[in-house]
Image: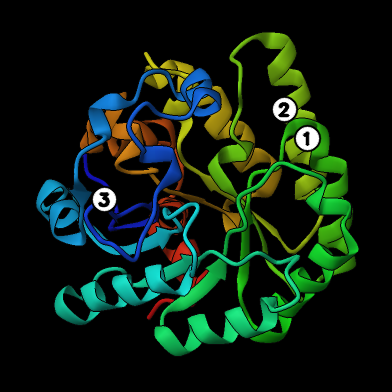
């Protein structure tokens, strides 16, 4: 099946041998909380997954642009990851954009943001991966507001019960683009959950500056098929519209459940009846625009 050129809006590179980096979720033995959601992902705990490896794995898939989302967790200085990624960009041209980690509640959040921007010219967003009371924390909101001043996207996947707070926060700060990661990371695949999830994405979509990244659906659907993904993908596009939705993969995490080409083929089959312009928007042009990629 013919597919438009792809901008992969969610990939992770890592190197367990790099002394300046740290990946809490990839440590031997794993993370019990993550294992409950992802299943046993020991198979992806390789020593490294570099930009070189991603390029080699996807070279026949018409991937034109790549957005790297923070992978290092528990790192002393998150700017080290940005410097590490910038070395790949200088050598290989990948990634084309970086979503970096910043503790937005920290007193020095503004300084850390500036250091990320100095470390790479392609820093385009921030992910502060947490599931505590951050969305109602005034200190975190102050850090969130800084993103608007710097033109940076906030990438986040709040828990279902936290969506009202996330939508309210995003509405208070229309200067910040709020990117809902992983289709709001659905944890279950039953009708009751689907109904609650669809209501939640509708609440986020009601905020004009929120956008939807459709990615990582294999994490909660390990034996997925095109038909099992279809309602979740189409519900996202229905809620946010073609102009505020786009695809990603969550590679190499979702490699546990599929091949790269199978994921892209599934997206293509699900939107096969869309217009050519709509298909191009979902596969690449929207992510290019939102993350300001040339």
Q: Position of residue 187 (x, y in %)?
A: 61, 22
Residue at 16%, 49% (x, y): give it. 58
Q: Nearer the viewer, residue 97 or 63?
A: 97
Task: State the residue position of label 3.
Answer: 16
Specify few, some or many for label 1: CA neighbours under 10 Å numbering under 14, 14-19, or 20 or more.
some
Circles 2 and 1, Cβ within 8 Å, touching? The answer is yes
Circles 3 and 1, Cβ within 8 Å, touching? The answer is no
Figure disc tally: 3
Residue at 19%, 45% (x, y): give it. 47
Query: Relative to 39, is 71 above or below?
Result: below
Q: Determine the CA span between mark 2 and mark 3.
A: 35 Å
Task: State the residue position of label 2.
Answer: 197
Residue at 87%, 47% (x, y): give it. 165
Q: Regarding mark 3 in the picture, which secondary structure is present there?
A: loop
Q: Which mark is residue 200?
A: 1
Q: Position of residue 158 (x, y in %)?
A: 70, 42
State left or right for residue 66 relative to residue 174. Answer: left
């Amino acid at each position: 099946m013919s597919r438009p050129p792809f901008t992969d809006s969610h990939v992770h590179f890592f190197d367990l041998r790099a002394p300046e980096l740290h990946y809490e979720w990839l440590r031997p033995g794993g993370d019990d909380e993550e294992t409950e959601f992802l299943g046993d992902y020991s198979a992806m705990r390789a020593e490294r997954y570099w930009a070189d490896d991603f390029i080699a794995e996807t070279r026949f898939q018409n991937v034109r642009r790549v957005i790297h989302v923070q992978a290092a967790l528990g790192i002393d200085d998150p700017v080290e990851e940005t410097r590490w990624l910038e070395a790949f960009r200088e050598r290989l041209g990948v990634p084309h954009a970086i979503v970096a980690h910043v503790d937005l509640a920290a007193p020095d959040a503004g300084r850390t943001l500036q250091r990320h921007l100095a470390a790479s010219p392609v820093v385009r967003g921030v992910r502060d991966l947490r599931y505590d009371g951050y969305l109602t924390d005034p200190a975190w909101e102050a850090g969130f507001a800084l993103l608007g001043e710097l033109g940076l996207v906030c990438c986040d996947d709040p828990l279902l019960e936290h969506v009202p707070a996330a939508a309210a926060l995003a509405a208070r700060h229309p200067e910040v683009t709020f990117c809902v990661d992983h289709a709001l990371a659905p944890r279950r695949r039953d009708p009751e959950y689907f109904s609650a999830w669809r209501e939640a994405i509708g609440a986020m979509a009601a905020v004009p500056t929120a956008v939807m990244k459709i990615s990582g659906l294999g994490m909660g659907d390990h034996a997925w098929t095109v038909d099992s993904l279809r309602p979740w993908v189409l519900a996202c596009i229905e809620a946010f519209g073609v102009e505020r939705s786009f695809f990603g993969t969550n590679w190499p995490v979702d490699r546990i459940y599929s091949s790269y080409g199978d994921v892209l083929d599934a997206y293509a089959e699900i939107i096969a009846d869309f217009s050519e312009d709509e298909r191009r928007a979902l596969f690449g042009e929207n992510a290019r625009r939102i993350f300001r990629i040339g």
